[in-house]
Amino acid sequence: MEKIIKIKNLNLWFGEKHILKDINMDFQANEISAIIGPSGCGKSTLIRTLNRMNDLIPETKIKGSVLLDGQDIYQEHNVVTLRTKVGMVFQRPNPFPKSIFENVAYGLRVQGIHKHREIAGRVENTLKAAALWDEVKDNLNQNAFQLSGGQQQRLCIARALAVEPEVILFDEPCSALDPISTARIEELLLKLKTSYTIIIVTHNMQQAARVADTTAFLLMGELIEVGETSQIFKQPKDKRTEDYITGRFG
Amino acid sequence: MKRNRFLIQKFWFAILGLSGLVIAIILFALIFFVTVRGFRVINWEFLTAAPKDGMTAGGIFPAIVGTFYLTLLAIAAALPVGVITAIYLNEYADRTNCLVRLSRKAVNALAGIPSVVFGLFGLALFVNFLHFGVSILSGGLTLAIMILPVIIRSSEEALSAVPFSFREASLALGASKWYTIRRAVLPTALPGIFTGAILGIGRVAGETAPIMFTAATFFTGRLPSSIRDEVMALPYHIYGLMTEGTHPEQQAPIAYGTALVLLILVLGIDLIAILWRYRSRKTKKW
């Protein structure tokens, strides 16, 4: 299996606060990797280093390296092209206050694609890939805020897919959704992994167990353990992992 | 004891309610008196003709036109500058930067400067130094400077009310910061920016002091033909009718009539802003 992302000796500080401590881990292509851990352990910060969203926070300091396809994203990559290769879906559905069509087309227009036929074709394909097409095909010009929360989140997934990234980061994508919408998103994740590499942060351990091929456990900024999901949940090597997944804290 | 406390609470609620009522009473009293004294002179001729017979008859049409041009120029000049400044301050500027803090303070200080001082400044800069003369151009630009802080503040508020998640979503799709501002932030902030601008228009239309030395004239029978012409203006017309001229007792009702027209215009403009804000709040879903 090909390792698409390699994190080496990654340290991150917000001001004086040491958030990520010497993280070393790899992500396999076409797999779902889950990052679990209690609130405030740095798991969101960790995936945000992968598309450099932490750059938006002033006084962030990063040491170490993150390699995407062998290239250091902090040295050799332009942040704009990086973000077209590494897409992101956020915790709360955050569609733009535009039509469904324009939401998906946004990333294409960013890339300078303006031919209506090409955009329309890609919007349709992407909405199909995000399992949303049948529900919205007659209302593409409707405002995205008219959709339900789960539909909005699938729209946000479609929006991320439209620019054809290699990797998609999911930052607790179901935490604001009901169980049925959550199930649909999980089903979608399993379908998407044939074409994309998926990294998902979740505070829901059952979710990690259901969808992830590998799972990493993060605690207070340290990577405690990473391995195949079944191994992490059945035979954790570290006592702290065991305590967390058996619900003794967190 | 318990009953006593309850009474005290009632007393203070009454005071609070009463002070709210006083504001409403003042507004209605003002509208009432201006209307009672002014409505008699208002007719079609009043709105469409120029003054005649030594300001004792005729209408105020040139003043309406003058106020319209002055306001239009002021808003056309102040809106782009104000919005761009607000974008810089809200989206780009590093809040700890010394220059940024200075310009923020300057915006606030500008808002507190008496309007007559703006008038003198406009006289010195536009009329004399830049040789624009007493004209729509000088007056409009003076008014523009005066409402700039209002527009900057309201635009900044509108921009900072745009959820950060919209910016994040756009940036995460590989958009540049400028693209994000243009396509994700500004369209969302636009209704707020425009309400601010409309309120600014209402404010500008009623100002006398800034145009007194820079644009306004007490009487001209003809309408302005260029931006370099001096004009009549509604607020200055009121001022002139009450302080100059030879027939004060005949001029006073005309002044009240003019005031009523001005009041209706300004309140009407504010009403548009309020309705617009109300509508955009209702359709907003984030």
Image (cartoon, coloured by chain):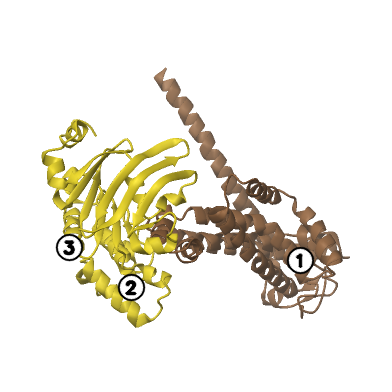
From the viewer's perspective, tell me whether residue B6 is left or right of residue B44.
Answer: left
- Residue A85 falls in which quadrant of the image? bottom left
> The disc numbered 1 marks a residue on which chain?
B
The chain displayed yellow equals A
Q: Nearer the viewer, residue A47 or B107?
A: A47
Q: CA distance from mark 3 to mark 1?
A: 66 Å
> The disc numbered 3 marks a residue on which chain?
A
Kind of element beneath mark 1: helix
- Residue B70 falls in which quadrant of the image? bottom right
Most extreme residue toward the top, as rendered?
B1
Kind of element beneath mark 2: loop
What quarter of the picture does the N terminus of chain A occupy?
bottom left
Q: Note whether B260 is above or below A6 in the view shown.
A: below
Per the image, the residue denoted by label 3 is A191
- Shade representing chain B: brown
Q: CA distance from mark 3 to mark 2?
A: 27 Å
Q: Residues within 10 Å of mark 1 (few under 14, many from 20)?
A: many
Most extreme residue toward the front, as rendered?
A70
Q: Note whether A186 is above or below A235 in the view shown.
A: below
Residue B254 picture location, percent across and down: 75, 66
Q: Give me the residue at 67% from left, 67% from top.
A: B77
Give me the disc on residue A141.
Answer: 2
Per the image, the residue denoted by label 1 is B139
> The disc numbered 2 marks a residue on which chain?
A
